[in-house]
Amino acid sequence: MDIRIKIHGNPESRDIQQVQEWYDANKSDLNEQTLADFQKLITDMKEFFEPVSISELAQMVSDWDNDSYIKMQTDWFSKTYAQETDPSIIIPAASGLMCDIRYNIQEDRRGTRRTSALELSLRLEELIFQKSSQWNPATIREHIDKVHALSEALASSGYVEKWGMGCR
């Protein structure tokens, strides 16, 4: 598939190398504006696909009260999954935490704390996006689990409506 089409329709982190190779091979034929555009594209792709550090997520809600449900769940998530690499484990856990945030964000009335919880939810969304292409289910059960986890993340992000009460 042509890399131009691929990066617009289904970008992956490994595409950065292909774009960089094309750029290096063709930069002598490009004008200044196109050179700048390509440099920006490569920078944007690197930034977009920068891995989310699970161990640092708890810092995003560090100013919340220690007995806050969102803070406790985020601390637990960060400690439990900091070394995990299996997307079939990380994605359901991250979508569950996103759901917890959506349904418990109103427990704190401070706008700054709510903002930090929303930023945390966005980072979890990035994590799920980055890991979802690495999750390759082999059985029907695994496909159902993947669809469920991604659906929960979509609903927790507000892209689709959640039909049940609460999470899971």
Image (spheres, rainbow, N blue to C red):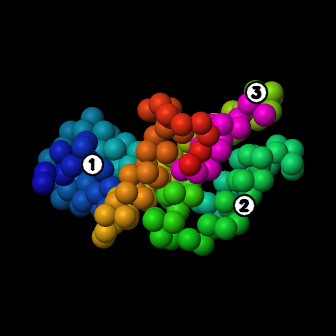
Relative horizontal placement of residue 100, taking residue 131 as reference (left or right)? right
Q: Secondary structure at mark 2?
A: helix
Q: Position of residue 146 (x, y in %)?
A: 40, 57
Q: Residue at x 47, y 31 (%)?
A: 161
Mark 1 and mark 3 lie on one chain; the one further toward the N terminus is 1
What amino acid type is highlighted by mark number 2? Trp
Marks 2 and 3 in Cβ contact (< 8 Å): no
| Labels 2, 1: front one | 2
Q: Position of residue 40 (x, y in %)?
A: 37, 42
Q: Label 1: which residue? A: 10
Q: Label 2: which residue? A: 76
* For residue 102, above or below residue 19: above
User: Can residue 52 be spotted in the picture?
Assistant: no
- Circle 1 packing at 10 Å, graded few (<14), some (14-19), many (20+), is few
What amino acid type is highlighted by mark number 3? Gly
Which circle marks residue 139 in the picture? none
Marks 1 and 3 in Cβ contact (< 8 Å): no
Mark 2 and mark 3 lie on one chain; the one further toward the N terminus is 2
Q: Is residue 96 a member of the stretch shown in magenta?
A: yes
Relative horizontal placement of residue 61, taking residue 85 as reference (left or right)? right
What amino acid type is highlighted by mark number 1? Asn
Of 146 and 12, the residue lying toward us = 146
Q: Position of residue 2 (x, y in %)?
A: 13, 51
Which circle marks residue 111 in the picture? 3
Q: CA distance from mark 1 to mark 3?
A: 35 Å
Q: What residue range appears in magenta?
A: 95-107
Of helix, strand and loop, which mostly describes the magenta segment?
helix
Residue 110, by quadrant, is top right
* For residue 102, above or below residue 150: above
